[in-house]
Amino acid sequence: MAGNLTRDEARERARLLDVSSYDVELDLTTGDTAFRSATVIRFDCSEPGASTFVDLVAPAVSEVVLNGRALDPAEVFDGGRIALSGLEASNELRVVADAAYMRTGEGLHRFVDPVDGKTYLYTQFETSDAHRMYTCFDQPDLKARFELTVLAPADFEVVGNSAPDAVREPVEGSGGEKVRWHFPATEPISTYITALIAGPYHVERDEHDGIPLGVYCRASLAEFLDADAIFEVTKQGFDFFHGVFGLRYPFGKYDQLFVPEFNAGAMENAGAVTFLEDYVFRSRVTDARYERRAETILHEMAHMWFGDLVTMRWWDDLWLNESFATYSSVHCQAEATRWTDAWTTFANVEKAWALRQDQLPSTHPIAADIPDMQAVEVNFDGITYAKGASVLKQLVAYVGVDAFFAGVREYFKEHAWGNTELSDLLRQLERASGRELSGWSREWLETAGVNTMRPDFEVDAEGNFTSFAVLQEAPADHPTLRSHRLAIGLYDRTDAGIVRRDRVELDVSGPRTEVPELVGKARPDLVLINDDDLTFTKIRLDERSLRTVVESVGEIAESLPRALCFSAAWDMTRDAEMAARDYVRLVVSGIGGVGDVPVAQMLLRQAVSALVNYAAPEWRETGFQLLADRLRDLLTAAEPGSDLQLVYATGFADAAVGEEHLSLLQGLLDGAITVDGLTVDTDLRWTLLRRLVAAGKAGEKEIAAELESDATATGERHAAGCRAAVPTAEAKAQTWERITRGDLANAEFRATLGGFGEPSHRELVRPYVDAYFARLGEVWENWTKEFAQSFAEMAYPSQLVEEETLRRTDAYLESESPAPALRRLLIEGRATVERALEAQRRDARAAE
């Protein structure tokens, strides 16, 4: 990975420079591989005569002029930086370069639509890829005004951070084939949130509260774009955030663009948010997918204030940027949209992600130490997003929601268009709430690891509690016992289901906290610690409560406690305290009573994961048979056309391994078998085919026929994944060659890696373990950060749950001393295998 800016370098450059403006001119008509980039930067220097550098990655630089003095590009440009010496108090730098279009989803990405041959461009600059498009001081605390001029083909729509004041001005002598767009200067913003999106995009427009709105997608996807639904969530978000943030949206217009081959879910470019194109639903999806899209829309909108208007000084506070946006988006969903159970989804999705990440050996404090850009690239993780948001939720409960947002409003007001650190926000929250937060910060933000809570009680002959306490534990590597505000719920079986009889809320600290309020109360069927999900912790169920959950989890009347019980059982399975087969049986017995679509989807994913990773190999096939049988029955009995029917169909496809189940999949795919209400549309067809291919029941003929019917970019991606999942040695060899060639586009690259690593193909991937470790160092050194990280994570032999995988990883770590970011990815992969080994041993003991 090139261009690894360090924190010390950034601090020194920020101390030295004050950047006022960028004037960027781009010519997008020069060819298919490169574009002309001309940049003028105006900046002051606090120490005239000093030296520094400016960032640029480009195949060729033709002009470097500093304060009227021409510099020789061959002498000052090293491929990633331009050296600047003899700075004056006020400086003007002009750089002209031929910059490269990217196919990796970084910098200025270029995509050609296979449907109609049209070209689409978009930028992705987070964390530091703006200098792939224009020359810049690429760090968040050197904010400046950006003015952009773009020469583009006549049929292009061009979108930037500001609204254009000159649209499609004909270029003299181009015969009407080229036009010029001009975007006036923005307010001061960071380089990583500048943006350019260009191409013959389809656009829908609207307006709300004086804000012009636009929603864009490729022309070939226009028929699937549900712009009205996107605008509805957008308007709800603006109304809500205007109220709680106390400051109007600061960037004028608001465009949302769904772009091809995007690496992330979305990116908060100021006034021009880009989204993963999969959020344009071309086949039927459940409402859970609409809920997740809404969360993403609101997450990026919250960033317009927290991240774009007020920006972290350095990536140490990346967590605060992302956690605030996540907390705010879920809060908005629950309060201002139809997804009023958004916190249940949060508990199932975000917190499950956070708990998984926080138990890896690479876990880190929420406020992490980020010494360089390689470190931040692997820090977009469950701690940064989900644990941080969970802890912010606790902070809101601690200071009070009104005081929290009062402090946030003052924070925005004080620091608009500037850069801040965590202490700036905490100071305003302390003023608004009257609470001292330095202790809270030390306890929750500056330590790593997750606590576990267990009930400890005794009962008398009549079944009443004679004592009750909450026990708090911490892992040996991260022994912090924290202060928690939590609730304990007592749930009884009734004719109306399992319902809460009593609830006690209290502060828990230290290894044991007595709960005198419960003494004398009758022992319930279910004791639920952390009822209402108030704190970030793992919970354990006592024997009777666990039996209640295993036998009757579907009878729990409310969605959130039901989700918490499933979460507790999943944590126990991952920690080898519960056999994987028992967890699978729990899901099999309880899934029919789960009406919450997001919860049902999560449970089925976890049940498959338990079978793939945690079940003893000799029981795995039996478990898949149990799960598939249950889902087949639920599929045929489900309400026709319901979301749950679609959940059961996709879950059944994931679980099908036996001949009977695979025959059903084949029948659904070719139409010989139908299920009332179930439409086997384009995306579901690919899901069914992928399972048949991986099982050896379909191959190239069927893949080619499906691709012919779906000759789109998404179809090509699915076909790539299917071809990589063909279970033959020849197919794996061809796939490995495609992966390591390094010339696939990003979306196809990830799909191919996913198919190559099909979990059931353990023996087929075994020959590539040595090849993986042999190529890893070269890949990390020479590929772009997105590709290098994807290869390191997805090609790691995690399917081979055995001691040899641990030994091979240890040998590489010891002999090669990889870069810290790569080392982190490897020890995470190793920990995944080690956890699976322990869980498989626990599951095997259950058969004894």
Image (tube, helix red, strand yellow):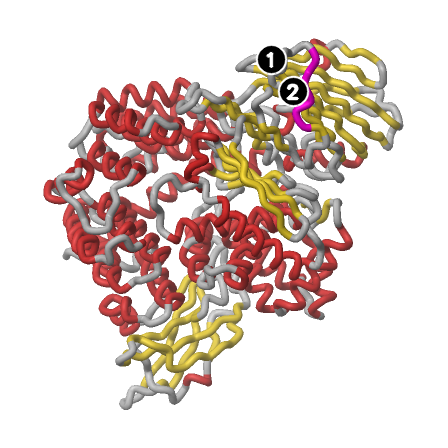
Q: Name the amino acid type tagged 2.
A: Val
Q: Say if mark 2 contacts mark 1, CB within 8 Å.
A: no
Which portion, as a residue range, is magenta?
167-172
Give the side of residue 289 with respect to residue 160, left or right: left
Please check the rendered image and state whether residue 495 is part of the magenta-colored stretch, yes or no: no
Query: Residue 789 versus residue 624: which sits nearer the camera?
Result: 624
Q: Percent from the top left, x then y, of residue 594?
A: 30, 62
If the image is split into quadrants, where does the C terminus sit?
Answer: bottom left
Is residue 240 shown above or below 727? Answer: below
- The image's mark for residue 179 is 2
Q: Secondary structure at mark 1?
A: loop
Residue 827 shows in the view: no
Residue reaching furthest to the front: 176
Which secondary structure dominates the residues rendered in magenta? strand
- Upstream in the sequence, badge 2 or badge 1? 1
What residue sits 43% from the left and 59% below the top?
347
What residue sits 19% from the left and 51% below the top?
676
In terms of image quadrants, where is residue 332?
bottom right
Q: Percent from the top left, x then y, of residue 15?
A: 79, 36
Residue ID for mark 1: 30
Q: Name the amino acid type tagged 1.
A: Thr
What residue sits 17% from the left and 39% below the top?
671
Give the side of residue 594 with respect to residue 456, left or right: left
